[in-house]
């Protein structure tokens, strides 16, 4: 999937769920700031930087691969947040992987529980702000990747599949400094059908 600008501008993505659907993992209040203010600011900043630049007319993914500095920071945060917010569904206990992705997780990490432990550790131990990713290489092998700031595995030639945002604005209103507690709750709001589709897509 490639994200095209419309009339030269990128748009704030619409959330695929109601604002209170992800609680207690993510509250409606956190979403109002995280999506409605932080992500909107990244969109505004990128749109202001594009006219007349070498990135005008490129897809969001192409900009993230090629850009540096402020353009990368804003484009990367838009791409990251689009993947982040679109991977969620209303809160559900006992939520587990499906399809080819589920099989690949078992193959590459031994079990879903082992993967969860490693992935949460990747998010909990990332210093400062950034993202922890589940990404696939060109052979379909899965890797856990820590990316600081606005980093995305596409810059390594990998396919991003699942991500947890560990910037403080993603959880501080609900969990204060308890980042690991927040990460543990996110498993209950993942839409594994969406994640499996990302893994199996040709793009």
Image: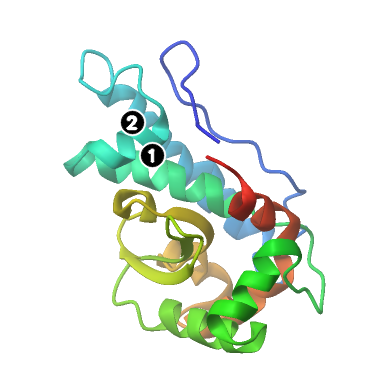
- In the figure, residue 114 lies in which quadrant? bottom right
Asked if 202 appears above or below 198 in the picture, the reply is above
Kindly identify the residue that appears in the image at 51 percent across and 27 percent down. Answer: 11
- In the figure, residue 112 lies in which quadrant? bottom right
Kindly identify the residue that appears in the image at 66 percent across and 77 percent down. Answer: 185
Q: Are marks 2 and 1 in contact (CB under 8 Å)?
A: yes
How packed mark 2 is, by other alpha carbons closer than 10 Å (few <14, some 14-19, many 20 or more), is many
The alpha-carbon separation of the residues under discs 2 and 1 comes to: 6 Å
Residue identifier under label 1? 42
The answer to whether any part of residue 111 appears in the image is yes
Q: Position of residue 74 (x, y in %)?
A: 32, 41
Q: Secondary structure at mark 2?
A: helix
Quarter that holds the N terminus: top right
Q: Residue furthest left?
A: 69
Residue situated in front as seen by the camera: 144 or 27: 144
Residue identifier under label 2? 46
Q: Residue furthest front?
A: 139
Residue situated in front as seen by the camera: 124 or 103: 103
Left or right of residue 22: residue 80: left
Kindly identify the residue that appears in the image at 41 percent across and 14 percent down. Answer: 8
Kindly identify the residue that appears in the image at 51 percent across and 84 percent down. Answer: 180
Q: Position of residue 158 (x, y in %)?
A: 40, 54
The answer to whether any part of residue 178 appears in the image is no
How many marks are shown on the rendered structure?
2
């Amino acid at each position: 999937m490639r994200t095209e600008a419309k009339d030269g501008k990128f748009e704030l993505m619409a959330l695929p769920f109601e604002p209170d659907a992800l609680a207690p993992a993510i509250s409606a209040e956190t979403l109002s700031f995280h999506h409605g203010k932080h992500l909107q600011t990244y969109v505004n900043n990128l749109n202001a930087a594009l006219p007349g630049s070498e990135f005008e007319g490129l897809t969001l993914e192409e900009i993230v691969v090629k850009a540096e500095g402020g353009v990368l920071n804003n484009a990367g945060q838009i791409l990251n947040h689009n993947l982040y917010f679109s991977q969620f569904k209303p809160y559900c206990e006992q939520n587990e992987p499906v399809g080819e992705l589920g099989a690949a997780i078992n193959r590459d990490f031994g079990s879903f529980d082992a993967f969860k432990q490693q992935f949460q550790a990747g998010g909990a131990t990332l210093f400062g702000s950034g993202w922890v990713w589940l990404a696939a290489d060109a052979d379909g092998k899965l890797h856990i990747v820590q990316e600081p700031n606005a980093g995305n595995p596409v810059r390594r030639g990998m396919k991003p599949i699942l991500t947890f945002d560990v910037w403080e604005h993603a959880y501080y209103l609900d969990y204060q400094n308890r980042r690991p507690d927040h990460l543990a709750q996110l498993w209950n709001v993942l839409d594994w059908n969406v994640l499996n589709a990302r893994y199996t897509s040709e793009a």
